[in-house]
Image (tube, rainbow, N blue to C red):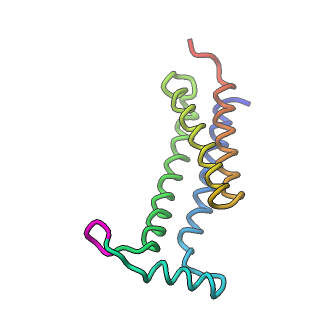
Amino acid sequence: MKPKLLLRIAAILMFLHTIGHTLGALSWKNAPNAAVAQVVSGMLSTHFDFMGRSASIGGFYEGYGLIMILVLLLISLLLWLLSAQSGNPLSVRFMQLLGVLLLMMGVLEYIYFFPFAAAFSLLAGICTVWALFARAPVE
């Protein structure tokens, strides 16, 4: 496969990951049962002082989820833009970094979240690393 196609596949995988994450991040307060509802309530209602303001674990959780939507969207966009530039030396270095980042994200998602989320990052990482080996040598 050509590097451009592999990077575009990786970009689409990460965009699908972004959509799934967005759906989860925007609906995390919708508890499927009473036990989860109690945990969510505790996360949102227990406040503590943090750096001069009142904060909650629920607020942090929600904020990190929203920030990750932007990060995943940025990764998708970078992979798509990189697919058009897969031959120049700077883009090769960027592919290396993104490939390692995506593989590490996949491992962490598998450990801390669930295999379905991890699969998107791992497959995108594999496509990105594969694109490195599929490219023509830079002269």
Residue 118 point in image, percent of width and height: 67, 53
In the picture shown, does residue 128 fall above or below 55?
above
> Residue at horizontal 70%, vertical 52%?
119
Q: Position of residue 66 (x, y in %)?
A: 47, 63
Dominant secondary-structure state across the stretch colored magenta? strand
- Residue sitting at x 52%, y 52%: 73
List x then y, in percent, for residue 110: 67, 55
Residue 51 sits in quarter: bottom left
Residue 67 horizontal/vertical position (percent)? 45, 59
User: Residue 51 colored magenta?
Assistant: yes
Q: Quadrant of the N terminus?
A: top right
Q: Quick one: which residue is furthest to the right in this view? A: 1
Q: Is residue 19 above or below residue 11?
A: below
Which residue shows up at 71% across the image and 58% down it? 116
Q: Residue furthest left?
A: 52
Nearest to the observer: residue 53 or residue 118:
53
Question: What span is colored magenta in the figure?
Answer: 50-54
